[in-house]
Image (tube, helix red, strand yellow):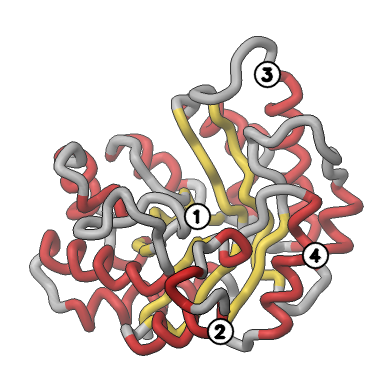
Amino acid sequence: MLTDSHCHLDRLELTPFDGELANALAFARERGVERLLCVAIDMENIPAVLELARRYPQVYASVGVHPNEQGREEPTVEQLLELASNDKVIAIGETGLDYFRSEGDLHWQHQRFRTHIAAAKACNKPLIIHCREAREDLLRMLEEEGADAVGGVMHCFVEDLATAERAMALGFYISFSGIITFNSARELRAVAQAVPADRLLVETDAPYLAPVPYRGKSNQPAYVREVAEYIAGLRGVSYEAIAQQTGENFNTLFRLN
């Protein structure tokens, strides 16, 4: 069972599928993708994400606000908890820190991150973490706020092995996207080889970051197969082994056993 552990189904380019998400999901299933986690990035898109999870049995949801989102409704712990009470919501996020796109006084970003950690601990659901050029502050805040009580996933991982090891010590899993297939990802490939099998996840982040040979095009959940196949080659195991292992890891992390 292949699982896309992070995608944005409400933002997919559906022109190749006659404008129908059902067709995109059918294409994904034809390629072995049987489950998907649709990740929210702002308060305004959460209703659409929850509706997709309600409509499609193979789709799960997360609730949260991306660290770069500004000028919209700011989440509270209470709001996140109410949203997370939905049976199809299995995680809090996407949350974290991003110093690449945000500048100046980032106290607001830090506070938002702490709010998500508090909500995750209160509802006992894992965190989906976005980290870009902020690893030291991010890891420190996870430690300070006791995020090891719930763990989570370092989504679209692009950091070094030392960062992965610190995150795994806090109960986090490491998820690789299509970036692993890029020519520039030599150091990242070494991390993908070193992460223990029982802490590994694969994702698309669709519609972003399409893997080779689709790089530069709109990404689709179906293309998580390319990520899984590439990692299988790196690790010297079969595609089937990676699909099964990452599916089992998804179950364990998100309490679906």
Measuring 69% from the left and 28% from the top, which residue is drawn there?
109
Label 2 – label 3 distance at C-alpha: 39 Å
Residue 207 vs residue 4, the one in the foreground:
207
Q: Residue furthest left?
A: 236
Residue 82 image offset from top left, x and y in percent: 88, 62
Q: Nearer the viewer, residue 117 or 34?
A: 34
Q: Mark 4 to mark 3: distance in Å?
A: 27 Å
Q: Which mark is residue 144?
A: none
Query: Most extreme residue toward the top, as rendered?
Result: 104
The residue lying at 64 percent from left, 36 percent from top is 67
Residues at marks 1 and 3 touching, judged by CB atoms closer than 8 Å: no
First reached walking from the N terminus: tag 2 or tag 4: 2
In the rendered image, residue 70, in percent from the top left (x then y), is placed at: 74, 31
Please name the residue that numbered disc 3 is placed on: 106
Say if 28 sits above or below 91 in the image.
below
The mark lying in front, picked from 2 and 1, is 2
Residue mark closest to the camera, 1 vs 4: 4
Image quarter for residue 173? bottom left
Would residue 223 appear left or right of 184 to someone viewing this image? Answer: right
Between discs 4 and 3, the one toward the N terminus? 4
The number of discs equals 4
Disc 2 versus disc 3: nearer the observer: 2
Q: Do labels 4 and 3 touch, CB within 8 Å?
A: no
The kind of residue on which mark 4 rests is Pro
Question: Is residue 177 in view from this perspective?
Answer: no
Disc number at residue 22?
Answer: 2
Q: Is residue 223 visible?
A: yes
Looking at the rendered structure, the secondary structure element under dot 4 is helix
* Camera-side mark, 4 or 3: 4
Report the residue marked by disc 1. 153
Q: CA distance from mark 1 to mark 4?
A: 23 Å
